[in-house]
Image (tube, grey):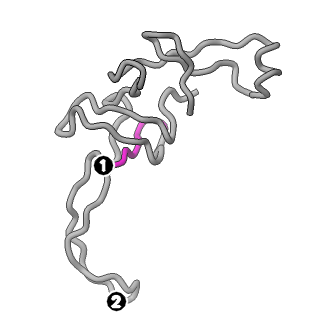
Amino acid sequence: MNKIRKGDQVIVLTGRDKGKRGTVTQRVDEERILVEGVNVVKKHVKPNPMKGTTGGVVEKTLSIHQSNVAIYNPATGKADRVGIKLLSDAEKQSRKTKDNGVRVFKSSGDEIKA
C-alpha cells in the first residue's frame, strides 16, 4: 500500500522547492510522483511540422522522489508522517474494502480522507 497517493496534499521537504505545497497529480512509478507546481522547468522545444507543434520555451513539470515530500495535515497545518492501521474483519466488511488497513496521520491517529 502506497503511503502517498494521487490526489493527496503534500509539502516538499528538500530541494529548491522546499516548503511548497501541492497536490499529487500522478504516480510515475513506485518511487516517483508528479506534484502540481513543484519541480517546474523550462524546456526548449524544436518545432515539428509533422506533429503540428510550434517551437519555443515550454514549462514542464518533472517528477520528484516520494521521500522528498510529506503529506499535509490540515488539522495542524504542518507536514506529517503516514501510518497504516490494520482493520479487523468486521471493519473490512462494513467498509467494503480489499485493503488490510487504512492510512492515518502518525501525530494524531486521524484517518486520511482521500
Residue at image coords 47%, 36%: 8
Q: Which residue is tagged 1?
A: 37
Residue at image coords 47%, 47%: 26
Task: Pick whichever, 13 or 111, lies toward us.
Answer: 111
Q: Where is residue 64 drawn, in percent x and y?
A: 33, 41
- Image height check: is 6 above or below 81? below
Relative horizontal placement of residue 21, taking residue 90 as reference (left or right): left
Q: Residue furthest front?
A: 75
Instruction: Check disc 2 and report its element: helix, strand or loop.
Output: loop
Q: Which residues are magenta?
A: 30-36
Name the mark on residue 49: 2
Residue at image coords 41%, 27%: 71
Relative horizontal placement of residue 16, taking residue 69 as reference (left or right): left
Residue at image coords 47%, 43%: 29
Relative horizontal placement of residue 84, taking residue 41 as reference (left or right): right
Instruction: Check disc 1 and report its element: helix, strand or loop.
Output: loop
* Alpha carbons under labels 1 and 2: distance apart: 30 Å
The mark closer to the camera, 1 or 2, is 1
Q: Where is residue 73 drawn, in percent x and y?
A: 41, 23
Q: Where is residue 62 drawn, in percent x and y?
A: 32, 51
Q: Where is residue 114 drawn, in percent x and y?
A: 56, 33
Task: Pick whichever, 8 or 27, lies toward us.
Answer: 8
Circle 1 residues within 10 Å: few <14, some 14–19, many ≥20? some
The three-letter code of the residue at mark 1 reads Gly
Q: Quadrant of the N terminus?
A: top right
Circle 2 residues within 10 Å: few <14, some 14–19, many ≥20? few
